Image (spheres, grey):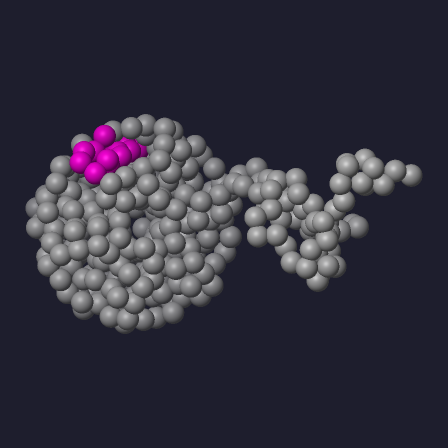
Amino acid sequence: MATYKEIKGTQIEVLASDPSNPVEGQVWYNSTSNVLKGQSATAAGSWATGGNVNTARSQAGVGGAGDKSSALLIGGAPSGGFTGATESYDGTSWTEVNDLNQARRGLAAAGASNTSAIVAGGQTPPAPSNAVTDLTETWNGSNWTEVNDLNTARNQFPGLGILTAALAIGGRTPGQRNHNETELWNGTNWTEVNNLSTGRENFASGGTTTSGIVFGGRNGGPDSKLSVTETWNGTNWTEVNDLNTAREQLGGAGADSTSALAFGGEGPPYRAETEEWNGSNWTETTNLPTATQNLFGSGTATNALAATGSASPGDVVASYEWTAAGPVTKTFTDS
């Protein structure tokens, strides 16, 4: 009987631990766990259940920063109210840390990790005054510190970027919906830069201050959901191809303008659809496990985190971790 070596021309590797960067089709024997393993490819990305948040919150008021292994959940609207509560995620569980100085919902947030973030704007209590703020706060891993204000107070808008280089985009005020203002944070001050092509609120974003993307939202009454996508090159916004499903109050993630993820939202009804952006087009992929609106979104198109939000009949504590399509390690058994 021919051996594997005679058929394939090589031996299966015997390794004490799994290789750090296996390639598709590679097979090896793990001598520590005494199992045969191989690397295969997945057909699509997938969502997996992560740790539950401590305080469920919703109503277009949850800001976030980081990725699925290092993220912050900031402020928001628990049971329709207001909170300054901040939670830190380490890839397994959420831990309550120090609160914002100003409780708020509908705020813009940006940051690289759970130790470095910035928030701006939002709606402040008491309800239903609909007062909006221009307050900006920065996070150093332990505490929030108030810094220089936005030029235009507003809420229900996203941010993107990092602590020292961020954008605050669009939003609404009590007297005006569908703002198109864009403001750039340089680590010290906010400066108005070129406007969005389509003013909007309740939309999602991803990327950096030199390569950003926004998508979805609303620019009128409750039935004026948007699929419009725009990319930012550091100077101007350019309209590109639309989402497949128009929606507002959705989650988003993305490293830059060439790679992003859109998920959840409100149509109506609540949405579970997930779409991937490849720099040219949006493609529908694996749905969220639960149709959810007003949810937190963070990370990149290959390594994203969705958490909390509103899913019938109320706010939820669940979080979900996204892994994009790609090679996965399989263990061979005799069954």
Q: Is residue 54 above or below residue 198?
A: below
Asked if residue 174 can be seen in this view, the reply is no
Q: Which residue is drawn at 88% across and 38% down?
A: 2
Helix, strand or loop for the magenta stretch, by majority: loop
Quarter residue 203 falls in: top left
Instruction: Spot the residue most to the right.
Output: 1
Q: In this view, does 156 lie to the left or right of 207?
A: left
Asked if residue 164 can be seen in this view, the reply is yes
Q: Is residue 235 left or right of residue 271?
A: left
Q: Is residue 285 left or right of residue 213?
A: right
The mark tally for this picture is 0
Residue 131, percent across and down? 11, 57
- Of 107 and 143, nearer the camera is 143
Q: Which residue is drawn at 47% across and 37% down?
A: 285
Q: In this view, does 325 lie to the left or right of 212?
A: right
Q: Start and end of the magenta stretch?
A: 224-238
Residue 282, percent across and down? 39, 32
Q: Is residue 232 magenta?
A: yes
Residue 62, percent across and down? 29, 56
Q: In this view, does 272 lie above or below 119?
A: above
The N terminus, quarter of image: top right
Residue 189, percent across and down? 11, 54
Q: Which residue is drawn at 17% across and 55% down?
A: 187
Q: Which residue is drawn at 34% across and 70% down?
A: 96
Quarter residue 69 falls in: bottom left
Q: Does the magenta stretch include residue 49?
A: no
- Of 74 and 128, nearer the camera is 74
